Amino acid sequence: MKKHLFILLVLICTGCFLASAKVPSAPALKFYPANNKYIQYTGRIDYSDQLKPRFWSSGVYIKMRFKGKGCEITVNDEMLYGNSHNYINIAVDDEKPYRVQTTDLTDNFKIGGNLSDKPHIITICKDTEAGIGYLEFVGIKCEKLLPMPARPKRKIEFIGTTITCGADLDRSLYPCNFGEWYAHHNAYMSYGAVTARNLGAEWQITAISGIGLTNSCCNIPIMPEAFDKISMRTDSLQWNFSAYQPDVVSICLGESDGATALDSTAFCGAYVNFINDLRRYYPRSEIICLNIPTGDVRLNAAMKRYVVGISDYMEANGDTKVHPYSITKTYTSGCNDHPDMGDHSMIATELTEYIRKLKKWKER
């Protein structure tokens, strides 16, 4: 009996000791506002309110480096028409990116939580285009925000329409013809963004669905009228071109022009004028007249001829930095006969090699 009482007493004392032992608490998270010098922004952004930088375009991205097992970001959504909710891509280090969707005017997204306790780099990218409304970045909560590595020296800009802005490529949440019309947008995995990452370059996507060179749908301004704006959909705030001077500019237009794209004189004349306008902003950039074949056989044949003819014309008139390139295959596996994510990856692989050779960029 005494032996049993002794064992019981030992167990009770041991339990009391364990209960009194302090369990390490998780480090407190500190809020860092959007104007913190360690937060790195890329894309057409309105900094009128530096505590809430505002951006419309698909492909605008923000990078941050933090210490700890997780973090939390805060974004505001315009909630255009009261019911539009943007999609955002989130990538941590080299892990597979994932999409989230806003649900309110202000959203907080917890990221990680069980990451290794070391520095991490997070990238958040606006997947949806200007027609879904703007986002504002408010800030990040983390254990400690750290300086980012130096920006890549290489810069590329991708000018285009539906394919270029990343529409119709992502069926991970909804099959085609289900969900909101923008539910299949994924600018982070579009051919432009993937090409840039392949090359170790920054990217800027200057594109919206339905925009054309000579004709646009849905009351959208044509590209020459909208190109110098922060929000191309509303044709409003002026963009400061000194903020981003690309080494390479890729132009992929024509798909949304409709029948007017088949008028070679009108279309090629407008294309040449647009390149001349670009030269005012980008005097040293290599310009690629890119043709990504669509399901329209007549348009494909015409665009393949056009980009060569336009390049030849520019060279004959003294601009030797304009180059034609046509993607070798037609990719229509996504929604509305546009490329899907796998197609975009293959387009990016081909375009990566072309740009690498054009610029003589070594692999990284």
Image (cartoon, helix red, strand yellow):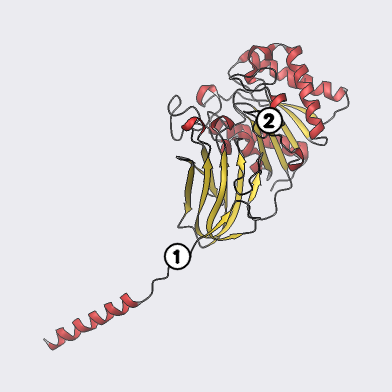
Q: Is residue 342 above or below residue 67?
A: above
Whether residue 157 sits left or right of residue 136 in the image: it is right
Question: Callout 1, which amino acid?
Answer: Ala
Q: Quadrant of residue 131?
A: top right
Mark 2 and mark 1 residues within 8 Å of each other at the beta carbon: no
Residue denoted by label 1: 26
Depth check, front residue: 49 or 60: 49
Residue 243 shows which numbered tag? none
Q: Position of residue 180 (x, y in %)?
A: 46, 28
Q: What is the secondary structure assignment of the residue under circle 1?
A: loop
N-term mark: 2 or 1: 1
Q: Residue furthest bottom?
A: 2
Q: Position of residue 36 (x, y in %)?
A: 63, 55
Query: What residue sits 66% from the left and 17% below the top?
Result: 215
Depth check, front residue: 41 or 98: 41
- Give the spatial CA distance, label 2 vs label 1: 45 Å
Q: Residue furthest front?
A: 49
Q: Quadrant of residue 350?
A: top right
Query: What residue sits 36% from the left and 76% below the top?
Result: 21
Camera-side mark, 2 or 1: 1
Residue denoted by label 2: 159
Question: Callout 2, which amino acid?
Answer: Ile
Whether residue 273 sits left or right of residue 12 in the image: it is right
Q: Quadrant of residue 59?
A: top right
Instruction: State how many labels appear.
Output: 2
Q: Position of residue 359 (x, y in %)?
A: 77, 39
Query: What residue sits 49% from the left and 27% below the top?
Result: 181
Q: What is the secondary structure assignment of the residue under circle 2?
A: strand
Query: What residue sits 63% from the left and 26% below the top?
Result: 161
- Mark 2: few/some/many CA within 10 Å (<14, 14-19, 20+): many
